[in-house]
Amino acid sequence: MELLEFARGPALKVALVVFCFGVLWRLVGTVLLRYHRHLSEPRDGYFKAFMLGLLVGGSRSWPHKQYIKRTGYGEALGYAYHIGLFIVILFFAPHVLFIKSLFGVSWPTLPSGIVTIIAVLTFTLLLAVLFRRLAHRVLRRLSNFDDYFSWFVTTLVIVTGLMATAHFGARYETLLAWHILSFDLLLIWYPFGKLMHAFYIFPSRIINGYFLARKGAPS
Amino acid sequence: MTTAIREQTVGEVLSANGVSRRTFIKFCVSTASFLALAPGMGQVIAKQLLKTKRPSVIYLSFQECTGCLESLTRSYTPSVENMIFNMISLDYDDTLMAAAGKQSEEARDAAIKENYGKYLVVVDGAVPLGNGGVYNTQGGKSAVQILRDTAKGAAAIVCVGTCSSYGGLPYANPNPTGAVPVSDIITDKPLINVPGCPPIPAVITSTLVQYVTLGVPALDAHHRPLAFYGNTIHDRCYRRPYFDVGKFAKTFDDEGARNGWCLYELGCKGPTTYNACATVKWNEGTSFPIESGHPCLGCSEPSFWDRNGSFYAPLAAGLIGSLAPAGEAAGVGAAVGIGAAALSRLRSRARTQSRAAEKTASKED
Ligand code: SF4
């Protein structure tokens, strides 16, 4: 079996199995954890509290006016590379073909040249993100292996993808195999590292908002 | 073929057949450019060919469909490529030769004896090893035995077609005859693979010319001459600009197909297939499969029947068959999550209760 076939076949299968197992384990395990009992009388009803929770889910995703000078740059970087990643993942024709082969759904794609430019920009932003983490004294102290490895697997997929698109560095089938293998690695790491934030981020904000509203402290 | 004729040099045979020097030089120069050699190499090939004795060639056919030989004989006539037949001494080819049965085998044995250590063996077709090799026998001998006996005194082996190079169709799953490529059997001779299903006629003949004049050509990891298999179809495909801008035909009769857009979504294996189809083309440079509207099947690559899922699955598609194992893993994950949460709740409740008990006890104290 050649490397490309291994990447597209058994490696992808194992990666998807680990990903699905890990994500469901962590999500269900977290959602069903015991919450503290609130001793005070609930201020808002369930529905209103839930709506306020949704509001918090949105408002917490936006820089706070008071801190924007300090956090604005980091948040802008974060938003920019996430948007880049979304466009590259969801609108590059071969990616849509990949998704279609797994789930049977597809949608219109963007010209490859545009996606390539966005991928290069995203890679540049990821470098800036790493530089910021290393240069920022507090952030550096807060960072651990998980932060760096999660950055590494994300960037690796982008870099190998760009190499495959540009046919740079090795034969196309080898580059494509590296790209798919790096994606397989990302899938395996996903549930166990900080990449899992993609699943946690909105539910946790909404649940927090909901409890705050029930306590009478909507924000 | 008499020994006297076999002893003639290529130059002698060509002038005997009335081939002018001008035609001959033109042929050598175009062969040099075809092989991606420096322009001056045309002269070297010419000089070499004129003084070279025509090497004896033994063409063995095993598990094959004769498509490769058909391809070789389709080199358009009259053409300089037909001169190749004046440059080699084709001493045995049971499909092309007039002799049959015992006589043809005698011709082969005579060629082996007279040219021991110098002749070239061209193999077409895979070699079955299953059940002692009974699936392909000729004159009571198995293909593997014939190959071993013939290869013993050969200077080199040229595998023409994907079957002899990598096993091809007979080797495809479930491979009922235990077919293997020549390289699995003969490991001690220089080996040149000219794969393709079939290979381009000019690629077969030019590889032979290069061998006759300059020896074994530069080869890639799969023993293919780099001059013809150094680039992918995709590298040289005229539809490449459409690939680069993301314009793909989605079906064989949609607007994209009619406009000649890229066939990647229809399963084109051009990006991972090394061959000269996009440049040399077929039938006097008329066309090649992609130009005719069909995606490349990747026929010059090992295991091309079995790999990549299907001929029509895009290269980007996953090859995992079904999503069921992932679904089951999700179910198990959810169950483990429920278990972990239940355990955590039990512990948390026990902690709360023991704290309450401690409080009560300290109050009582
Ligand atoms: S048709 Fe095939 S070889 Fe040609 S550009 Fe498209 S993918 Fe590449």
Image (spheres, helix red, strand yellow):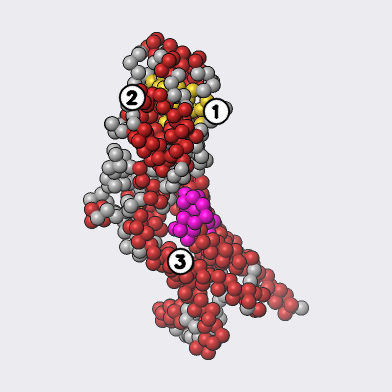
Q: Nearer the viewer, mark 2 or mark 1?
A: 2
Residues at circles 2 and 3 in contact by the CB criterion of under 8 Å: no
Do circles 3 and 1 both sit on a common chain?
A: no
Q: Quadrant of residue B187?
A: top right
Label 2 and label 1: CA atoms lie apart by 34 Å
- Does A44 lie within the magenta span? no
- Tell which of A147 and B71 is nearer to you: B71
* Viewer can see residue A29: no
Earlier in the chain: of badge 2 and badge 1, it is: 2
> Which residue is depicted at the point 51% across and 33% down?
B215
| Residue A66 appears in the rendering | yes
Of the 4 image quadrants, the one containing the N terminus of chain B is: top left
Residue A200 higher or lower than A44, as above or below: above
Q: Amino acid at mark 2?
A: Asn
Q: How far from the left and from the top, in percent, is residue B243?
A: 35, 57
Identify the main secondary structure in magenta: helix
C-alpha separation, residue under disc 3 versus residue under disc 1 = 48 Å
Amino acid at the residue labelled 3? Ala
**Amino acid type of the residue tagged 1 in the rendering:** Lys
**Region in magenta:** A161-187
Q: Is residue A148 above or below residue B163?
A: below
What label does residue A119 carry, if any?
Answer: 3
Look at the numbered disc 2 and say if its residue's Cβ is closer than 8 Å to ligand 1.
no
